Amino acid sequence: MKTYTEAIKSQNEQIIVTALLQTLPTKNNALLEKMKAYKAETTEVKELHNIYIKAVELRKEGYAQMLEALTTKVSDESATDDAIAKLGESDTKFAEFETKRNSMMKDLGLVNANEK
């Protein structure tokens, strides 16, 4: 399968999962390594960056668990539930990141008057 679009157009669940399994880990790992390589200049930005990295790692783990659950023929509901819980943890971390980022931007006067 050349693209996700072709996989989705096939409407075959196994082809879609195979396309995701073949491309997501490589792309996610490369992106995560680039993000981890970033060196923040201040403690505040470093803390914010670490929250974002943790959110991305949790999201990656959740998707990996979900793909595993979808590709396992004898999968029980708990495997899917675990993946959904991991994705929920990721959402919580992303929300924490956004809240702290917005607060930092406000403290630094980087928020437009319309956004306050």
Image (cartoon, helix red, strand yellow):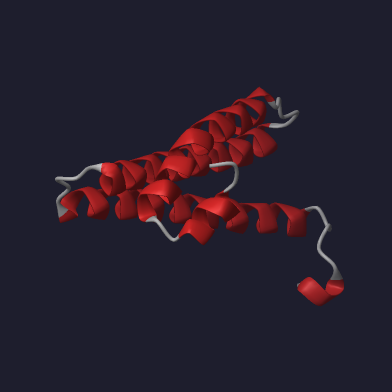
Q: Is 110 drawn above or below residue 63 in the view shown? A: below
Residue at the outermost bottom position: 114
Q: Residue at x 29, y 44 (%)?
A: 71
Position of residue 78 measured from the top left corner of the image (x, y, whole percent):
17, 52
Position of residue 103 measured from the top left corner of the image (x, y, whole percent):
67, 57
Q: Is 48 drawn above or below residue 37 in the view shown? A: below
Q: In which quarter of the image is residue 41?
A: top right
Image check: 84 left or right of 52?
left
Q: Residue at x 35, y 48 (%)?
A: 86
Q: Quadrant of the C terminus?
A: bottom right
Q: Which residue is drawn at 83% across and 58% down?
A: 109
Q: Can residue 95 be seen in this view?
A: yes
Image check: 116 left or right of 8?
right
Q: Residue at x 50, y 44 (%)?
A: 55
All told, the count of numbered labels is 0
Q: Nearer the viewer, residue 21 or 52?
A: 21
Q: Which of 58 and 81 is in front in this view?
A: 81
